Amino acid sequence: MPDSHPPMPSPALLDDAGAAALVASYGAISKGAQLKDIGRIDAHMRRYIELSPFCCIATADRAGRQDVTPRGDPPGSFKVLDEHTVALADRPGNNRLDTLRNLFENPEVALIFMLPGIAETVRLAGTARLSTDAALLDSMAVQGARPRCAIVVSVRQAYLHCAKAFFRSKLWTGEYAQPWGTFPSISRMVGDQIGLSEADKKVGEERTERAYRDGLWAPIT
């Protein structure tokens, strides 16, 4: 589908010296912001994570090329194992395995947990390893389906993040929510991007509909 929007002019970019001067021009960090990273998951953050149904995990490969992946699960699926360890399931996806491949090359990760109706978030960072521990995977089963593996994060950084972004975006108010049908199906949009035929787009839509209906917790066959 052709883009009907005229191109914007390329923005002027700062060089290293200009960027350094800009960063230095910001105000001093507040004492609260300095101290809020407590480096562990306390009772408040533990309760938040255990209620959260959604997080994003950021990883990078050996060269530093980054990826951010959304993760969604019923409350209680994200496991706080202790004040320095959290685990999340790797559910069925498209088998690109961007996160898992990155972790194999570079264990550094960052996560942001969200909780609908709560404007603050929880941010964690640390290093991650993959686990196929049977007891852990059993505890993550949904509708009888265990994940194939879990991502276990050793937490180095942990803090609560303020609500300004959520107030600006009105994320939980629904004010900016778009009606169903604003966009074509994802299968049709990707089909446009990669040049699929109309017949192949319809096959893709049927496959995606089945995956959304039957493949959330276990791969469809």
Image (cartoon, helix red, strand yellow):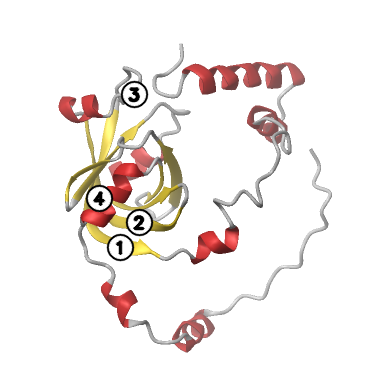
Q: Nearer the viewer, residue 32 or 67?
A: 32
What amino acid type is highlighted by mark number 4? Answer: Arg
Q: Secondary structure at mark 4?
A: helix
- Labels 2 and 3: the sequence-earlier one: 2
Give the alpha-carbon distance from disc 4 to disc 3, as whole Å.
Answer: 21 Å
> In the rendered view, does 211 fall on the left or right side of 156?
right
Mark 4 residue crowding within 10 angstroms, few (<14) / some (14–19) / many (20+): many
Q: Earlier in the sequence, mark 3 or mark 1?
A: 3
Is residue 199 among the parts visible in the rendering?
yes
Question: Which of the pair 38/63 is nearer the observer?
Answer: 38
The picture places residue 16, in percent across and down from the top left corner, at 50, 80
* Residue at the extreme top: 221
Residue wearing tag 4 = 46
**Mark with earlier residue (2, 4):** 4
**Residue density around tag 3, few if under 14, some if 14–19, many if 20 or more, within 10 Å:** some
Q: Residue 65, how many percent across, how many down? A: 44, 53
Label 1 packing within 10 angstroms: few (<14), some (14-19), many (20+) = many
Q: Where is 220 relative to 78, above or below? A: above
Type of amino acid at the residue the image marks with label 2: Val
Q: CA distance from mark 1 to mark 4?
A: 11 Å
**Residue at (34%, 43%) from the top-left corner?**
51
Could you say which quadrant of the image residue 162 lies in?
bottom left
Could you say which quadrant of the image residue 14 lies in?
Answer: bottom right
Q: Which residue is mark 1?
A: 159
Relative horizontal placement of residue 213, taking residue 90 as reference (left or right)? right
Label 2 Cα neighbours within 10 Å, binned few <14 / some 14-19 / many ≥20: many
| Residue at 17% across, 25% down | 134
Name the kind of residue labelled 3 in the image: Val
The residue singled out by tag 2 in the image is 122
CB-based contact (under 8 Å), mark 1 and mark 2: yes
